[in-house]
Image (cartoon, rainbow, N blue to C red):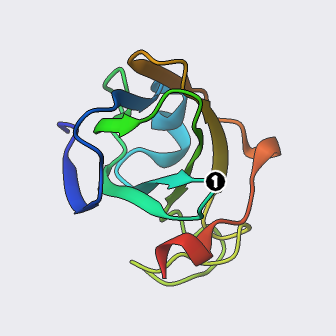
Amino acid sequence: MPLVAFSTFSALAEEGSDLTFQGDASFGGPHGGQSIQAALIDTASGEVLGMESGEVSASAEPAFAFEFPGALQEGGNYEVHYWIDSNFGGGSVGRCDEMQNDHQWSIPIEADGGNVSHVETHDPSTLASVCDTFE
């Protein structure tokens, strides 16, 4: 199944550096075919700078990839919040549910003045509640 990403919101700066946020193939087994949403957050202001959605691939490398062009300002503090619509043991399709149902993470991103490429590995031991970001 091909990787699909959709841009749903963007308040990104034109003069900043690009962020590429990816999940490696380890996401494919537990989450292949499931919907994913990711948001880039400016942690100083709490502002959502951009939001993307797509589907986790069961077989491709990377399993998902999101681009946030021009989003990072040197010295800025950022996080990527993302969740996968897993519905393990319950939950609602299309809604970010509790962590035991929908896996979700908060990942710090450092802006050093250049383009940033970040690759995540699936790690359920580092879950963090981020549903409020997507309401």
Instruction: Say which residue appears at 37% left-offset and 24% top-offset.
Output: 62
Callout 1: 10 Å neighbours few (<14), some, many (20+)?
A: some
Say left or right for 58 vs 100.
left
Say left or right for 32 vs 70.
right
Q: Is residue 78 above or below residue 103?
A: above
Within the image, what quadrant is residue 26 found in? top right
Instruction: Say which residue appears at 64% left-offset and 66% top-offset.
Output: 130
State the image coordinates of residue 126 (x, y, percent, origin top left): 79, 44
Question: How many numbered marks are there?
Answer: 1
State the image coordinates of residue 84 (x, y, percent, origin top left): 50, 58
Q: Is residue 131 above or below residue 2?
A: below
Instruction: Say which residue appears at 31% left-offset and 25% top-offset.
Output: 60
Q: Is residue 88 above or below residue 16?
A: below
State the image coordinates of residue 132 (x, y, percent, origin top left): 60, 77
Instruction: Say which residue appears at 72% left-offset and 65% top-offset.
Output: 129
Residue on which the image places disc 1: 43
On the question of residue 36 being in view, the answer is: no
Say left or right for 89 vs 1.
right
SS class, disc 1:
loop
Frontmost residue, 12 versus 24: 12
Frontmost residue, 40 versus 13: 13
Dot 1 amino acid type: Thr
- Quadrant (top left, top right, bottom left, bottom right) of the N terminus: top left
Residue farthest toward the right in the current orientation of the protein: 125
